[in-house]
Amino acid sequence: MTTYVWDYLPEYEKEKADILAAVEKVFSSGRLVLGDSVQGFEQEFAGYHGVGHCTGVDNGTNALKLALEALGVGPGDEVITVSNTAAPTVVAIMGAGATPVFVDVREEDFLMDTDQVEAAITPRTKVLLPVHLYGQCVDMAPLRRIAEKHGLKILEDCAQAHGARHHGSLAGTMSDAAAFSFYPTKVLGAYGDGGAVITADDETDRALRQLRYYGMDKVYYVVRTPGHNARLDEVQAEILRTKLARLDSYIEGRNAVARRYEEGLADLTGPGRLQLPATNDGNTHVYYVYVARHPRRDEIIEALKAHDISLNISYPWPVHTMSGFEHLGWPKGSLPVTERLAGEIFSLPMYPSLPEAVQEKTIAALRDVLAAL
Ligand SMILES: *Cc1c(COP(=O)(O)O)cnc(C)c1O
């Protein structure tokens, strides 16, 4: 059987009773849209983060898009972010009618290079959009200083960082608003699509609730255009409640997997050789993906196929180089670190219920392949 980087079935086997009970609870509740389950999840997710508000939405892309709109972003505005991210970060900015402006990432941790942000600001800049990529947070102190100095808002893309801490603060609590995805692979994943925005600001939350509900303030009465239908589904919300109670144990499980990779591969690391993920001082890592780096990445992936191991790359194409974004005007070479990384990174299997035997097989195969390079 081929080994893949992600699989939810081992987890489903363990949690089946709770998942099916959640589905049954909604189906027999008499209310299928925006009922007690969405409201309950919103309260519990806000409570987990210690913030005043959570609005459940239908996916992470719309969480970002609606959050930008709620923060007042629209056509003509610029949003500063990175190209080394999942495409939806940028799709959402453009969906809100705004223009993405990219800064490069750092060699050490593949995260936004906050030293480049100030030079990217123009009179049209509205929001800074750091992406807590792979499961650890971007340095927030410099971003907050810059935002304050230039009167900008900050929106955190937390789609990969549920439960990650940065100098003690949870991802999503260090800005004006934060967007989460509950796509099944995520650290907190639904059994389908889902998303949420958290904020401490009453007005931002009110805007989000209108935006996800056609722009309506109350039933049948629209106060905001353009609105959307972007509601979180009741069934997914109830499943997410059972999984939120386990979030910290999922994070522990992911960290245990990361420690075993480190033990099994540390002696192969070094400059020009294998690079394993580093956790920055002040951060805890939730390892949404476990991204390694090697200058001969393509040969490694090819050779692992003979061992029945199929690895993923997050992500093979920097967003600014894809044809759908060409018109934004970021030619090849404009973000050198991002572009170099895309040719050298690869993801090892990572999920909390990853069987140890599968992980041992992956480590052994990688050791064989690297020895033969
Ligand atoms: C998954 C992801 C998204 C989009 O979430 P969806 O729920 O798939 O729409 C946005 N940003 C990042 C960084 C992601 O990883």
Image: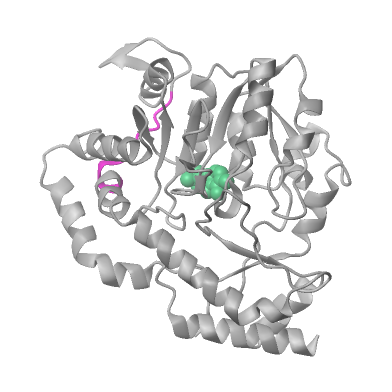
91 left or right of 235 in image: right
Q: Is residue 230 inside the magenta stretch?
A: yes
Q: Is residue 294 above or below residue 283?
A: below
- Who is closer to the viewer here, 38 or 147? 147
Q: Nearer the viewer, residue 30 or 93?
A: 93
- Residue 247 position by quadrant: bottom left
Residue 332, image x and y in percent?
A: 87, 46
Residue 163 sits inside the magenta stretch: no
Q: Residue at x 60, y 49 (%)?
A: 133
Measuring from the top left, give residue 369's x and y in whole percent: 72, 86
Task: Inspect this view and state whether residue 5 appears.
Answer: no
Does residue 26 appear to the left or right of 83 in the view shown?
left
Say above or below: 178 vs 322.
above
Q: Which residues are magenta?
A: 228-236
Is residue 317 shown left or right of residue 171? right
Task: Give left or right: position of 221 versus 130.
Answer: left
- Residue name at image x 39 percent, y 44 percent: 194
Quadrant for the C terminus in the image: bottom right
Judge whether residue 81 can be spotted in this image.
Answer: yes
Q: Position of residue 330 (x, y in %)?
A: 83, 37
Looking at the rendered structure, the number of numbered marks drawn on it comes to: 0
Report the colour scheme: one colour
Relative to 21, is 29 above or below? above
Q: Quadrant of residue 294?
A: bottom right
Residue at the spot x=78%, y=62% of the render?
Answer: 343
Q: Which residue: 44% across, 49% down?
A: 163
Measured as percent of width and height from the top left, residue 105 is found at: 75, 46
**Closer to the camera, 200 or 327?**
200
Magenta stretch secondary structure, dominant = loop
